[in-house]
Image (tube, grey):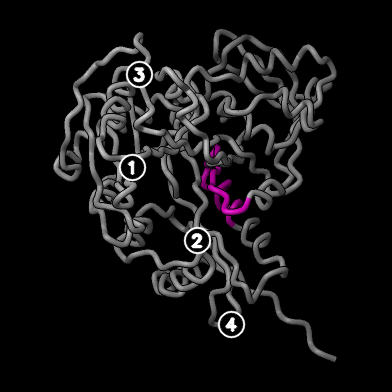
């Protein structure tokens, strides 16, 4: 009889493990990160924030979390554990490696006191069972530049300059900082990350041109040009603190001669189509989840954000992964919440993933009620939940990690 295969051993990482981790990441994700990029990400890893699964001397699984600062609706900024580099070697699938690593890494996240954990999912069907819910949505939009005509009522604020991005690093960072402090999903960007972005390494261009930059006092657009005869513009980052900056930057982008299309990744509430006489020239070519959230401290997280209406409700939240749910009295007055454990009869039943999806206001309670993933004893509670959890500022992903 063949002896059972021993389970991989879980342990923390040391500095000596990073070459093996880099190889595993390249194998699982299909590419090697440049060494300077890897070094930049290493500076953001939380203390004791890496869990490895090892089969003898071989690293066959890994999960780490970054030390992030995340803006929530209303402008408060919370520490968040940003899970990244989650990988299991193709030689060790279906052995419970991922679950084992996730139990360990979330134990560390809880012990470190993070109220939120966040990730970007390479596959949409994996992380719901771990209590994560998709909290922001990204849409890929492509504008037929030559057919884009601004509506006569849309102003022309001007104020956009063509600059070399690296020479204006401090101004770009200041604009982004102002934007992320008022935008749900905004993330603090360390200087090392700005340095890496603006280094504009050849291997980061994916066949596109070097970075171009359009700069306004309250916004900027970084973009690359692709193709030759049918050249197109790919906006890699557009950040606008004011409506005027948003309009001015789009007027400049759509004024680029010889370009066929201008593509951008943005949020569903972006008003770009309404700036034009014919909104059909703005085509949505893709839509997918971006940031996923797991709320690790329900009272702290719910009390941190702001709300759109008063509400009194008892939430019963289940967590099939770690049983970290519970029953809570949520009382909202004048935009502020008080959330305390209770034994009272619940008004709303849901799970931790749904609560994560509702947290930024990017998803509506009504759609989860329709799917029976949010159940209310009183159906009139659903529209009241919608009004309360709505966010005046649309949620966006600060950056990928």
Q: Secondary structure at mark 1?
A: strand
Which residue is label 1 attached to?
A: 233
Which residue is label 4 attached to?
A: 56
Gap between marks 2 and 3 measured at Cα: 50 Å
At label 1, counting other C-alpha atoms closer than 10 Å, the crowd grade (few under 14, some 14-19, many 20 or more) is: many
Q: Tags 2 and 3 in contact by the CB under 8 Å rule? A: no
Q: Which residues are magenta?
A: 105-123
Which residue is label 3 attached to?
A: 150
Q: Toward which corner of the image does residue 186 lie, by quadrant? A: top left
Q: Toward which corner of the image does residue 90 lie, by quadrant? A: bottom right
Labelled disc at residue 50: 2
Gap between marks 1 and 4 measured at Cα: 49 Å
Q: Earlier in the sequence, mark 1 or mark 3?
A: 3
Q: Quadrant of the N terminus?
A: bottom right
Residue placed most toward the observer, 310 or 287: 287
Gap between marks 1 and 3 measured at Cα: 18 Å
Q: Earlier in the sequence, mark 3 or mark 4?
A: 4
The residue mark sitting in front, 1 or 2, is 1
Residue occupying the point 48% across, 56% down: 49
At label 4, counting other C-alpha atoms closer than 10 Å, the crowd grade (few under 14, some 14-19, many 20 or more) is: few
């Amino acid at each position: 009889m063949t002896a059972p295969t021993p389970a991989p051993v879980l342990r923390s990482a040391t500095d000596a493990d990073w070459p093996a981790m880099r190889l595993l990441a390249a194998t699982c994700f299909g590419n090697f990160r440049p060494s300077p990029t890897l070094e930049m990400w290493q500076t953001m890893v939380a203390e004791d924030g890496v869990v490895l699964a090892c089969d003898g001397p071989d690293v066959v699984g890994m999960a780490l979390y970054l030390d992030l600062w995340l803006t929530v609706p209303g402008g408060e900024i919370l520490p968040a554990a940003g899970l990244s580099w989650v990988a299991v070697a193709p030689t060790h699938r279906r052995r419970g490696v991922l679950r084992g690593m996730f139990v360990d890494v979330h134990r560390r996240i809880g012990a470190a006191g993070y109220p939120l954990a966040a990730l970007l999912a390479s596959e949409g069907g994996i992380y719901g069972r771990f209590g994560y819910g998709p909290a922001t949505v990204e849409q890929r939009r492509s504008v037929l530049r030559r057919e884009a005509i601004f509506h006569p009522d849309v102003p022309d604020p001007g104020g956009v300059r063509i600059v070399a991005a690296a020479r204006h690093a401090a101004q770009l960072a200041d604009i982004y900082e102002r934007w992320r402090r008022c935008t749900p999903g905004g993330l603090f960007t360390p200087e090392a990350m700005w340095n890496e972005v603006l280094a504009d390494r050849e291997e980061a261009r994916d066949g596109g041109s070097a970075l171009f930059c359009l700069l306004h006092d309250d916004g900027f657009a970084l973009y690359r040009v692709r193709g030759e005869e049918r050249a197109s513009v790919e906006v890699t980052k557009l950040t606008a603190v004011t409506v005027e900056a948003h309009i001015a930057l789009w007027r400049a982008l759509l004024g680029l001669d010889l370009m066929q299309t201008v593509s951008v990744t943005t949020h569903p509430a972006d008003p770009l189509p309404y700036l034009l006489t014919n909104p059909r020239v703005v085509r949505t070519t893709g839509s997918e989840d971006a940031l996923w959230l797991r709320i690790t401290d329900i009272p702290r997280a719910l009390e941190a954000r702001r709300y759109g209406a008063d509400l009194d409700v008892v939430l019963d939240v289940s967590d099939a992964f770690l049983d970290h749910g519970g029953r809570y009295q949520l009382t909202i007055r004048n935009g502020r919440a008080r959330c305390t454990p209770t034994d009272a009869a619940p008004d709303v039943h849901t799970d931790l993933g749904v609560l994560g999806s509702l947290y930024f206001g990017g998803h509506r309670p009504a759609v989860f009620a329709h799917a029976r993933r949010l159940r209310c004893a009183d159906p009139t509670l659903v529209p009241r939940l919608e009004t309360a959890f709505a966010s005046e500022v649309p949620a966006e992903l600060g950056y990928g990690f």
